[in-house]
Amino acid sequence: MKLRSFAHTDVGRVRPENEDSFLRNDDHQIYAVADGIGGLPSGGQASQLAVATLEKIFTGHPAGHKLNYPRILSEINEQVFRLGRVLSPQFGIGSTLTFAHVTGVKMHIGHVGDSSAHRLRLKTLEQLTSDHTIENELKERAARGEPIGMLMENRNALTRCIGQPPPLESDCTEHTILPKDRYLLSSDGITRFVELKEITDILASANNPEAAARQLVDRANERGGLDNSTAVVLFFD
C-alpha cells in the first residue's frame, strides 16, 4: 500500500498564539498532534517539546519496527514534566499527545488527553481514541454502577496529560490497515466545532490528504475559529 500524508495547523480567529504542534515524518512513518493545555502557562512549549521528543526517539531507531509505546510516552511525559518544574514550578505545564506509527500493515496509536485519532473505512468514521476527560471518566464509572456527580462546567477538564507528575497512564492500541483507509489525527479545535458527519464527508470526498486537512481547518475557522486547529491526514492507497 502507498501512504500519502499532509499536516496543517492554524491559530484560529481568537487565540493570540498557536499552542498546537504536529509531527509528520514520512521516512519513519510517525505522525502526531499535540495541543498545549489552556489554563496552564507555556502550552506551546509543552506541545513543541512533546513532538520534538517523540521524533527524536523514533528517528533514533530503525524505521518500520514496533517500539515500546507506553515507555516512549512515559519518557516524553518526564521531559515535559521536568520543563514544567523550570517554567512554572507552581502549576506545571501540559499538553495532549496523540500519535500514529505505521509498521507494515499495522497502525499503532499512542494517546494521552483529548486530541484524537479517527479512521474512515467503507464510509464509516470511527474514533480510535477515548478522550481523557472528567465527563468520559464519570460515564465509565456510571457504566460500572458507581455513583457519580459532576459540575457541567468541569466536564471537559482533562484527567490525563503529558507533563503530569509520573507515573503516566496512557492508551496504546494496534489496528490493521486496509487499502483505502483514511486516518485523521486532530486537536479538539477541530472535533469540538466540526460535526462527525462533516469530518466523514470531507475525508471521503477529498482527492488527497492536503485537501482534507485544509478543508477541516477551514471549516473549524468558519465556525468562529475559537481555538487552534490542527489536522494530520493519512491516505492509504
Image (cartoon, rainbow, N blue to C red):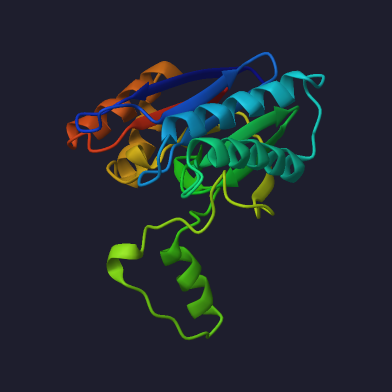
**Residue 194, x across and y down, in percent:** 29, 41
**Residue 78, x across and y down, in percent:** 67, 41
Left or right: 233, with 31 as reference point: left
Q: Image point 45% across, 44% down: which residue?
A: 125
* Residue 165, visible in the rendered structure: yes
Q: Image point 41% across, 17% down: which residue?
A: 210
Please state the total of marks drawn on the protein image: 0
**Residue 6, x across and y down, in percent:** 48, 18
* Viewer-closest of 107 and 138: 138
Q: Image point 49% across, 41% down: which residue?
A: 95
**Residue 179, x across and y down, in percent:** 61, 29
Q: Is residue 43 above or below residue 195?
A: above
* Residue 237, visible in the rendered structure: no
The quarter of the picture where the N terminus appears is top right
* Viewer-closest of 87 and 141: 87
Left or right: 90, with 199 as reference point: right
Q: Is residue 62 above or below residue 79?
A: above
* Viewer-closest of 213 and 187: 187
The quarter of the picture where the C terminus appears is top right
Q: Image point 30% across, 39% down: which residue?
A: 198
Which residue is at the far top?
27
Q: Is residue 168 above or below residue 231?
A: below
